[in-house]
Image (cartoon, grey):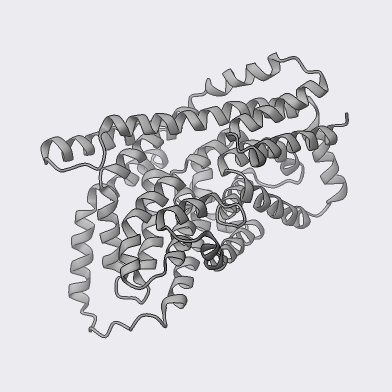
Amino acid sequence: MSPIALLLMFLLVFLGSAIITRIPVAFAIGFGTFAIMMLKGSPILGFAQPIYTTLDSFPLLSMPYFIFAGAIMQYSGISDSLIRLVDSAVGRIRGNLGAVTVLASMAFGVLTGSTAATLTAIGGMMISPMLERGYSRSYCAALISASSFLGVLIPPSIPGILFALAANEKISEIWIATIGPGFLLGGLYIAINYFKRKRMEEKNVDPLILKEYFRSVAVQTKNAFWALLMPIIIFGGIYGGICTPTEAGAVSVLYGLLYFIVKKVVLKRKMENTLWNISVSSACTTASCGIIMCISAAAGRAISMTGIAVSLTGFITTHIESPTVFFAFLLVLLLFVGTFLDHTASILILTPLLLPTVKAMGINGVHFGAIVMVTLCVGLITPPYAASLFIGTKITEARFSDVCKEIWPFVAAGVVTAIATTFWPPLSLFMVNLTK
């Protein structure tokens, strides 16, 4: 079989088993890999070896560290102080609860780097106040679902780590590359929320007393000191040359454990969960990501051995000479794949497949990473199959069909941000270049 035919067979088995039978993504990738290996007659050892070499990686240690640290912060109640700080800053504008939800999701992303954690933590705290203020359940689900992946674009980011490892790029540069798109998207979400809620809420007629306003912000900043200190430790250590991202992850775990112990043992505060349950949950998340990484690495090796990546590069460069046309093709592909598949699996499958073509086109690898991260995240909220929407719908107890009607302005904002990230490289590379 030709390499292109093998690629189509891989996608057919992979997508068919994942979507139709609903088996875990890792197993679906494995079935697709076995299919092309059997058709090509490749030795089975080619499947086992990359599984081991993938796990034998020092930078990979940063993933379980940040997952564990994020879980500790999620269940220690530290997000409450962040929400109060954001509310003190933007609480006067109409639609302020929606703006608080967006900004709190961005802030919480600094602590967890996880879409699911941001969705459940921020959604769990903001839904009741928003419903009491007159927000519909379907709109709450749409806003919270759309805001959740801002936690992935604002570093540290677990998908960012996975992309950096798959593309052999610096983790810190991939993290920085998504900050600009993340803030742009957050601003668009706040604007959408303001105009949708403007006619439904009365304007705050109380006079703005700057002295009291800044005093309130200062008090809430003081209360949120321990939450704000964590990103300072992480990024100050990395960009100050004190530690690597992996070592920064270990420091963040130590910081989270100290915070948890002091609050529970010394201050005698009630915690949302036990340290044992947090550890078990983090271990399960890490194992899930690890399994997907291992199987995806085996798939990447099989794709490389069968010549699929080389043939795909030749096919694209032959028929697509303009980088602009390739960027358009890339956006459509990523949005389509991100709609149906988890972004972790999408990153690990598509990155080694498209990377040779990206290099042949002369595209910056970090810029490519920002495009992949942003566009795949938009796919998480794009119907008909949108993973974040399903979770948001379940949390708010809304009807999925109603949520789909409310989500389109946020999808449009995501597409605009993806286009800006793709065709205006400074949006993602400006801050990266400042750190060099």
Say above or below: 279 vs 418: above
Of residue 63 and residue 274, the one placed in the foreground of this image is 274
* Left or right: 32, with 399 as reference point: right
Number of callouts in the render?
0
Q: Quarter-wise, where is residue 280 in the image?
A: top left
Location of residue 360 in the rendering, given as x and y in whole percent from the top left corner: 77, 42
Of residue 424 and residue 212, the one placed in the foreground of this image is 212
**Residue 70 visible here:** yes
Location of residue 134 in the rendering, given as x and y in whole percent from the top left corner: 36, 73
Say above or below: 99 vs 223: below
Q: Residue at x 76, y 46 (%)?
A: 361
* Left or right: 262, with 287 as reference point: left
Say above or below: 217 vs 262: below
Quarter of the picture containing the N terminus is top right
Q: Quarter-wise, where is residue 125 in the image?
A: bottom left
Location of residue 239 in the rendering, given as x and y in whole percent from the top left corner: 42, 42
* Left or right: 59, with 9 as reference point: left
Q: Residue at x 37, y 73 (%)?
A: 95
Q: Residue at x 66, y 59 (%)?
A: 423
* Left or right: 130, with 432 as reference point: left
Q: Quarter-wise, where is residue 12 in the image?
A: top right
**Residue 248 visible here:** no
Location of residue 75 in the rendering, given as x and y in whole percent from the top left corner: 29, 42
Say above or below: 433 vs 217: above
